[in-house]
Amino acid sequence: MTTASFQTKIGKMQSAGCRLCKIAREARGASTDGLADETHSHINSAGCEGMATTVTATHHSIWRHLYDSMYAAQKPESRLKFVTLDNESNMSTLWQREEFLRICSKEELAEKAQDIEVTISLKKRKKRHGTTSIQDLSS
């Protein structure tokens, strides 16, 4: 499949706007102004309004399979503990648990992570984060 972005570049279409986002917005009765460019990476992301539900469901399905495989392969004597058995967690929800608070506070962890991050050179950061711009890294 060629994308609208590519077809616009070669003069076959007038707009590079995502056709799937446009259909999703029209179905909701929302404006179709300011559509994201239709690229392969956009279509395969949850940022595509027409594919968000499918992409998210696929992500969760793959994660459950990966998690189940890792959990099943865990040896009984392992000290490794999976902390998110049934659902995903983030820093806020993990640090609501007493066992994490005993290790350190969420603020202490954030400070340490920031201390480490500032030691990483800009060149390494750009490489690690793909196409992240310099402005994105400063915030």
Image (cartoon, rainbow, N blue to C red):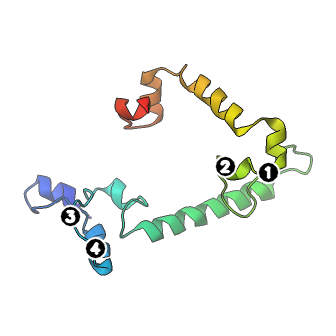
Identify the residue at image location x=11%, y=63%. 13
Residue located at (59% from left, 62% from top): 62
How packed mark 1 is, by other alpha carbons closer than 10 Å (few <14, some 14-19, many 20 or more), is few
Q: CA distance from mark 1 to mark 3?
A: 44 Å
**Distance from the alpha carbon under mark 2 to that under mark 3:** 35 Å
- Between discs 1 and 3, the one toward the N terminus: 3
Q: Which of marks 1 and 4 precedes in the sequence?
A: 4
Q: Label 3's element?
A: loop
Between residues 78 and 73, which one lies in front from this camera angle? 78
User: Could you tell me if the residues under marks 2 and 1 are in contact, i.e. CB atoms within 8 Å?
Assistant: no
In the rendered image, residue 6, in percent from the top left (x then y), is placed at: 19, 55
Q: Are marks 2 and 4 in contact (CB under 8 Å)?
A: no
Query: Could you say where residue 81 lies in the image, as x and y percent from the top left?
Result: 82, 48
**Of the residues under marks 2 and 1, which one precedes in the sequence?**
2
Q: In the rendered structure, find residue 92 and report the number of the disc placed on it.
A: 2
Where is residue 19 shown, x and y percent of the image? Answer: 24, 68
Question: Which label sits on residue 97?
Answer: 1
Q: Which residue is mark 4?
A: 30
- For disc 3, the marked residue is 33
Residue 85's tag is none
Q: Type of residue at label 2?
A: Ser
Is the C-beta separation of discs 1 and 3 under 8 Å? no
Q: Amino acid at mark 4?
A: Ala
Q: Earlier in the sequence, mark 2 or mark 3?
A: 3
Please name the amino acid that badge 1 sits on: Arg
Q: Secondary structure at mark 2?
A: helix
